[in-house]
Image (cartoon, helix red, strand yellow):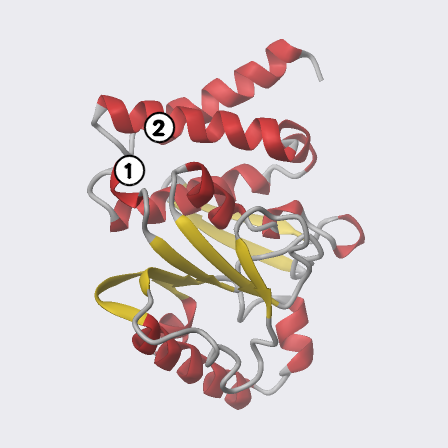
Amino acid sequence: MNPDLKDNKQNRLITELKRFWNDDQDQVLLANTIRALFSHYDLDRKMAKEPGVEDFLKQMSGRLANSFTRLSDIRGQRILDIACGSNTSKAPAALRIDTPFGEMAFGRARKGYTAKFEPWFCRILVELGANPVGVDFGDLEGEVFTHHQVDLGRIGALDFLPDHSFDGIQDSRLFGSPEFTALIPNHKDRLKIALEIKRQEQRLLKPDGIVIHSDAEALLR
């Protein structure tokens, strides 16, 4: 790709995401994080191939802005991402993403695979100096953050993680993933897993920890 086009993509995304953070140091940290994602994960090509990748980055950035006063506060935080995504994730036939810039709708990616469901949240956290832990059905080989391949459709699947060991937790995209719905097609059974995920979140959070986002909690409302 033309380096100028890549720089334009980077700068446009940085400009959009900077509005979440007023502090100059946080804006510098945000810009460095986005540049690292472009450098390490071929983000320019993936954004060109799948426009929804950019919207996922906006969504995850918005969640951080809603959860932390300062972007620099994330440094050193131990954060669990349940159903973090993987390098083998497939997209559902139809997908809606609620971003801070509005809701976006997308169809299935070519051959089912999608870069939208790569572990972007954990990757962002790494660049921000946090200590993310990702768990997912899929392949996370080669990722630099701590990760575990886990059957999230099984009760007790997260019991190996210590009580009150995380400063923040999110679960996202599990209940709409093709892998999960194929494994657990019955809605009542999916609700049981949602209850289990919510129980685990309560068990795993430190007393002053925060739930950054929980699809399980939303499903149970």
* Placement of 94 over or under 37, stated as above or below: below
N-terminal-most mark, 2 or 1: 2
Q: Residue furthest right?
A: 111
Looking at the image, which residue is at 51% across and 44% down? 123
Q: Is residue 188 left or right of residue 202?
A: right
Look at label 2 and name its amino acid: Leu
* Placement of 33 over or under 182, stated as above or below: above
Does residue 212 appear in the picture of this structure?
no
- Name the foreground residue: 37 vs 104: 37
Q: Mark 2 near mark 1, Cβ–Cβ under 8 Å?
A: yes
Q: Quadrant of the N terminus?
A: top right
**Residue where numbered disc 2 is placed:** 29
Looking at the image, which residue is at 70% across and 35% down? 49
- Name the foreground residue: 3 vs 29: 29
Q: Which mark is residue 71?
A: 1
Q: Quadrant of the C terminus?
A: bottom left
Measuring from the top left, give residue 83's x and y in whole percent.
53, 64
Snapshot quadrant of residue 86:
bottom right
Looking at the image, which residue is at 64% across and 12% down? 3
Q: Residues within 10 Å of mark 2 (few under 14, many from 20)?
A: some
